[in-house]
Structure formats: structure tokens, C-alpha cells
């Protein structure tokens, strides 16, 4: 047993490196995305209702992204979150999240917008 004042043997903790860095994320932006999720719950009954099936056509995330970008560039307010056009950037990210989920299930397919 070690005597008082003696340093205990120090063992270095080890962990495999990872390829992500959460400290590089803007937590105010993440919180804003969470506010959109809460709004979706209020409006549609579930924040994850988009995950049950894939929105297509005019309801698809790919269709909504350019409209939010146009609204941001035009400095328009958001229909729910007020006059700050930055909410459109958050809505773009939320739509990208939905498309990311769909693409992870079915693979990436060329958009009609890309043609």
C-alpha cells in the first residue's frame, strides 16, 4: 500500500482515435435545429414523422432546400420563427438531414434539378 504523499502508479488511459470532433459544431445552430424538430412535433404530431416514408416530388427535402435558400437570399423572415432570415439556413440543414436519411436507405439518386 502506498504511503501518504507517494504518487500512485499512473496508467495512461487509452482510446481509439475517432474521425469526428463535436466541439467543432455550433451548438446554437444545433439548438435551432432542435427547435425546428419541436415545431414539427407540434405541427405534424412527431418530429420523426418524415422517417416513416420518403417525401417525394414537391414535398421532398430536395425541393424545399432551394426555396429556403431563395428566401434567405431575399432576406425574408421564416413563416414560423419570425423575421430573422437565418432560420432559412437552419431549415436547409433540417431538410438536408431528411435527405441524408433517405439517401442512406435507398442510395443517392440523381435529382431532376441536376439535369
Image: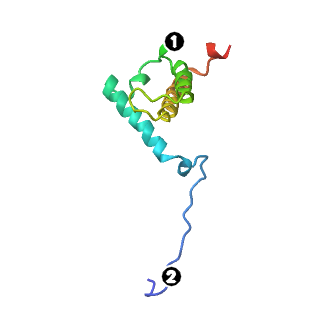
In the rendered image, residue 1, in percent from the top left (x then y), is placed at 44, 83
Q: Quadrant of the C terminus?
A: top right
Labels 1, 2: front one: 1
Label 1 sits on a secondary structure element that is helix
Q: Which residue is mark 1?
A: 57
Residue 113, disc: none
Between 110 and 65, the one lying in front of the other is 65
Residue at screen point 44% across, 36% down: 33
Farthest-out residue, right: 115
In the rendered image, residue 46, in percent from the top left (x then y), is placed at 34, 27
Label 2 sits on a secondary structure element that is loop
Residue at screen point 62% across, 12% down: 112
The quadrant holding residue 41 is top left
Between 26 and 81, the one lying in front of the other is 81
Residue at screen point 56% across, 56% down: 15
Above or below, 5 relative to 14: below
The quadrant holding residue 45 is top left
**Cα–Cα gap, marks 1 and 2:** 67 Å
Q: Which residue is mark 2?
A: 7
Check disc 2: other Cα within 10 Å, few if <14, some if 14-19, many if 20+: few
In the rendered image, residue 91, in percent from the top left (x then y), is placed at 48, 30
Amino acid at each position: 500500500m502506498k504511503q501518504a504523499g507517494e504518487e500512485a502508479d499512473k496508467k495512461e488511459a487509452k482510446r481509439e482515435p475517432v474521425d469526428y470532433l463535436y466541439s467543432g459544431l455550433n451548438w446554437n445552430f444545433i439548438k435551432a435545429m432542435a427547435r425546428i424538430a419541436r415545431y414539427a412535433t407540434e405541427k405534424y404530431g412527431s418530429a420523426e414523422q418524415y422517417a416513416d416514408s420518403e417525401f417525394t416530388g414537391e414535398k421532398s427535402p430536395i425541393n424545399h432546400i432551394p426555396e429556403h435558400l431563395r428566401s434567405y437570399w431575399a432576406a425574408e423572415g421564416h413563416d414560423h420563427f419570425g423575421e430573422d432570415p437565418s432560420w432559412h439556413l437552419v431549415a436547409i440543414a433540417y431538410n438536408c438531414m431528411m435527405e441524408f436519411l433517405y439517401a442512406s436507405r435507398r442510395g443517392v439518386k440523381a435529382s431532376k434539378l441536376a439535369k
